[in-house]
Image: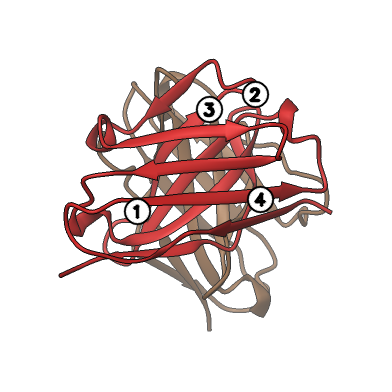
Amino acid sequence: EVQLVESGGGLVQPGGSLRLSCAASGFTFSKYWMSWVRQTPGKGLEWVANIKEDGSQKYHLDSVKGRFTISRDNTKNSLYLQMNSLRADDTAVYYCATHSGWSHSYWGQGTLVTVSS
Amino acid sequence: QSALTQPASVSGSPGQSITISCTGTSSDVGGHDHVAWYQQHPGKAPKLMIYEVSDRPSGVSTRFSGSKSGNTASLTISGLQAEDEADYFCNSYTSSFAFVFGSGTKVTVL
């Protein structure tokens, strides 16, 4: 059974940093592209970043470029999102998800990030 | 990249069919067949229901079907059931390995 478990969310002040993690199991992690997707009540779902199987290609949403960095460690079956210079509008539930072709086939339960003073 | 446009809500009675639209541009929905649909129940993670415009993952009911015409994709739920009450989001590949989601549609079973 595919399992994706996010962690690392919490309350952080504007300008602060957080590192999200996603622990994967039940599939061959190193053979799949992975994504981070966030969700807010006001803006719905928003793709944030994705990364190729071997980590050699990474793509980020324009509004997070230079602030967020996606990475992975295939030896630990883990996906990461380093978030710096956080802003109030980054407040959301952050999901990690697997890619199957051009869709997001499996999702974790999400971790809540709240940016507030 | 602006969100794809979906109706805020759609409703139907049990057994009826409903269709949810998802309108984008020639740069996303209209530019290729990489359109997907997700179902999300309150407090739960999204679940893939349709990919590549009209393909269903294993285990998804045949009551769910997808199509596309020009810049608009559609999700049809036939034989509406109480368990179909949820939020539905469309999603399209854009370019340079980026994706855009729809604004979401709340489906209510009357």
Residue B55, percent across and down?
70, 37
Q: Amino acid at mark 2?
A: Glu
Mark 1 and mark 4 in contact? Answer it, CB < 8 Å. no
Instruction: Name the residue that disc number 1 marks.
Output: B103
Q: Is residue B65 left or right of residue B96?
A: right
- Chain coloured red in the rendered structure: A
* Residue in view at x 52 percent, y 61 percent: A110
Please state the chain letter of the residue tagged with numbered disc 4 in the rendered image.
Answer: A
Q: Amino acid at mark 4?
A: Ala
On the same chain: label 3 and label 1? no
Secondary structure under badge 2?
Answer: loop
State the separation of the CA atoms marked 1 and 4.
Answer: 28 Å
Secondary structure under badge 3?
Answer: strand
Q: Amino acid at mark 1?
A: Ser
* Residue in view at x 69 percent, y 30 percent: A32
- Chain coloured brown in the rendered structure: B
Q: Is residue A38 left or right of residue A56?
A: left
Q: Nearer the viewer, residue B27 or A108?
A: A108
Instruction: Name the residue that disc number 3 marks.
Output: A51
Bin the neighbour count of mark 4 within 10 Å (Cα to Cα): few under 14, some 14-19, many 20 and up.
some
Q: Is residue A64 visible?
A: yes
Q: Amino acid at mark 3?
A: Ile
Instruction: Name the residue that disc number 2 marks.
Output: A53
State the separation of the CA atoms marked 3 and 1.
Answer: 24 Å
Mark 3 and mark 1 in contact? Answer it, CB < 8 Å. no
Instruction: Name the residue that disc number 4 marks.
Output: A23
